[in-house]
Amino acid sequence: PKHIIEAAKKALDEGKTGYTPAAGIYELREAVAEYISESRGVDVKPKEVVITVGAKMGIFASLIAFLDPGDEVVIPSPTYPAYEGVTKFVGGVPVTVKLREERGFSPSGEEIASAVTDKTKAIVINTPGNPTGGVYSREDIEAIYEVAKKKDIVVISDEIYEHIIFDGKKHVSALSIGDKEHTVLLGGFSKSWSMTGWRLGWVIAPEKVADKVAKVQLNSASCPASFVQYAAIAALKGPWDDVWKMVKEYEARRNLIYEEVNSIPGFSMIKPAATFYAFPNVSKLGVKSSKLADMLLNEAGVALLPGTSFGAEGEGYLRISFATSRENIKKGMKRIRDFVKEKFF
Ligand SMILES: Cc1ncc(COP(=O)(O)O)c(C=O)c1O
């Protein structure tokens, strides 16, 4: 959005180009604390907010803050790959729970509980979810917290797609359901404001954890870029019109791609409830997802990802991003449809 770009330019002109505190400038921590407090109905203080170099740094730093070698992390999967990657990087053990299409890709409390052991340090959830486009139900999040509280485990909740949610549904945040002591909330500016290249996210955590997260950032990136943080204050303060306009457009694209995907023989898909990802089930075609994705790239000229790029549980699925024009979506879908008809039927 234009007013955010203007705010970045203004910050540059005003010479806001030096290092900032590792946890971010106070004004932005305050603005995020205000936004989170209001949207979650929980009192969050600026000292419980760390501004990170993208949500990805938030994932990295918060897992490092909790994990020692041998510790287990429960991760519903297929999922954004960074959780598993960082867990392994620090010598931890990812324990995956298969997200099922028939549950709208929302894990049940029993499924989570059965993956928890005495070594579990964290449960990572991602709602709305990449790559599934699924949204966890309130009941499922409540059940996850029952497990987390009983075993004194932290829930790390990645809510970066919180605004990109359809059909008038309201985002249900982990922080609105669980207690602050057992929650690390991740979010940021990349998706809602299309600020992927600006590299700006947030971590909301109890002060002691927030301090550790800031320390990881201090000793790696030092701090997020200074003028970008000033621009982010403008993003939060609004106007938010561009955000809602974009979400509306994503919803129209979601409706389009839902119809298109289900018209391809051998493909089936439940309606993505959120995000800008379609996650069709292609298991009927009887070919491995990675092979199908390669064929579609090389023989039909369509770039998409196999479900297995998001964990072994993604076998039998493809992930298609619809962060592109409706025209491109139609063109891509036609290519896939023509290719599949010719090759498999
Ligand atoms: C679930 C999820 N979390 C985090 C990120 C990373 O966000 P950022 O660009 O702010 O680092 C992504 C980006 O694709 C994502 O899909």
Image (cartoon, grey):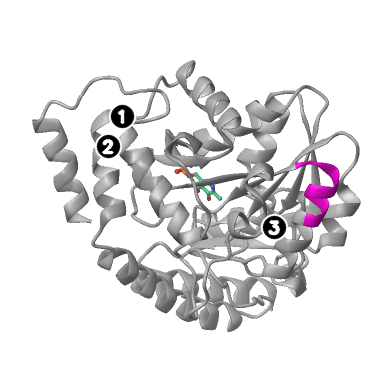
Q: Amino acid at mark 2?
A: Val
Q: Quadrant of the N terminus?
A: bottom left
Q: Amino acid at mark 1?
A: Ala
Magenta residue span: 146-153
Q: Main secondary structure of the magenta part?
A: helix
CB atoms of marks 2 and 3 within 8 Å = no
Depth order, front residue of 260/253: 253
Disc 3 CB within 8 Å of nearest ligand 1 atom = no
Query: Secondary structure under badge 3?
Result: helix
341 to 156, vertically: above or below: below
Query: Secondary structure under badge 1?
Result: loop
Q: Residue at x 24, y 43 (%)?
A: 231
| Residue at image mark 2 | 228
| Residue at image mark 3 | 289
| Residue at image mark 1 | 225
Q: Position of residue 186 (x, y in %)?
A: 53, 45
179 to 176, vertically: above or below: above
Crowd around label 1: few <14 · some 14–19 · many ≥20 (10 Å): many
Mark pair 2, 3: CA separation = 39 Å
- Closer to the chain start, of discs 2 and 3, is 2
Q: Residue at x 29, y 44 (%)?
A: 232
Q: Position of residue 122 (x, y in %)?
A: 74, 40
